[in-house]
Each structure stands twice: as C-alpha cells, then as structure tokens.
Amino acid sequence: MRSLHGALLLLGLISGAARAQATPGDPRAGIAAFNRAFDEATRTMNNGASLALWEDNGVSLLPSTRPIVGKQAITRFFEQVTAPLKGATMTSFDFQCFDITVSGDWASEWCTEHQVVALPGDKPPFDGWGKMLLVLHRGVDGKWRLTHEMWNQAVPPDSLR
C-alpha cells in the first residue's frame, strides 16, 4: 500500500503543473504558485499537469522502489500505477508545506499531505498520509519545477486519532 500512496501522490505531481506561472521578483511567490499547481494536479489526478511540474531530469525517490529518473521514467511509472486505477477519484486532499529555503534559483521545502481516494468497484477507499521533501529549481522562464522529491509514509496527527 505504501507504493500506491507514493504513486498516487506522484500521479498528482504529474498532473497539475501546467498552472504554475512564472512570478518575477519574490521567489516565494513563485514557489507558492508551484505549490498551488501541485495541489491542483494531485487533487484532479491529472498526469499531464503533474508532469509539467518536473524538470526533464527530475528524480523521484519513493519507499521500496528504485529511483525514478527523468520525465520518461516518471511517465512510465504513472502509466503502470494508473492503469488499475481507472475510475478512481480523489475525494479529499490536504497539502501543507513548511520551511521554504531559497538560495538563488534553488529552493527546498518539506510538506505533509493527506489524501483519500475512492477506488473503483467494491474496494475500500485509500486513506493515506505522507511527508515529502521537495527540491525545486527556477528555470530561465521563471517557473519553479521539481528536480528531486522524496516521499515517505506518515501517521495522522495526534489530534485526529
């Protein structure tokens, strides 16, 4: 189930990036735009939009898998993960990022996420929590894109138990 959770999160990344807009000036505004696009891509499970959030040589590090290197490999991974999920829908997604650190055209942040996905058929919904570390790079077009992401499973906050 861990790889499904990471795959669903990565699926979201591949889907909503097209909405990230270049933001001249304050780099945090551009990172906030990236995060909104990430949220939307994940929420809508849109592979194409998520893929647009990645640099061509991006690397995804998911639990119990080999590194997924480059957009072609990420695309193949998503195709393998989404094939059995036809008809699945994201029913809720909560995404929060913290400690944005910017150094020139490079930035990092760590994020938490919680997603509930209704699966097709009689399968129970997927309800997962995760933590991520994102490394972003600002391209010559001013857009922030993922160069590296590492995800691992998390537990619900104590307040929700």
Image (cartoon, rainbow, N blue to C red):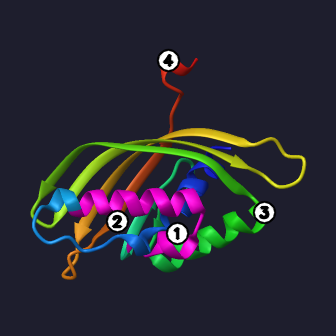
> What is the distance, in whole Å, between disc 3 and disc 1 at their CAs?
16 Å
Q: Main secondary structure of the magenta part?
A: helix
Q: Is residue 64 magenta?
A: no
Q: Tell me the quadrant of the picture where the C terminus can be found.
A: top right
**Marks 3/4: CA–CA distance:** 32 Å
Q: Residue 146: give its label.
A: 2
Q: Which of the marked residues, 4 or 1, is nearer the chain's N terminus?
A: 1
Side of 48 relative to 58 (left or right): right
- Seen in the picture, residue 22 relative to 124 is either above or below; the reply is below
Rendered view: 128 above or below 4? above
The amino acid beneath tag 1 is Ser
Distance CA(mark 2)–CA(mark 4): 31 Å
**Image coords of residue 52 (percent x, y):** 43, 76
The residue that label 3 is drawn on is: 87
Magenta highlight range: 30-54
The residue labelled by disc 1 is 15
Q: Dot 3 surroundings within 10 Å: few (below 14), some, or many (20 or more)?
A: few
Residue projecting furthest to the right: 122
Residue at image mark 4: 159
What is the crowding at mark 2: few (fewer than 14 residues within 10 Å), some, or many (at least 20)?
many
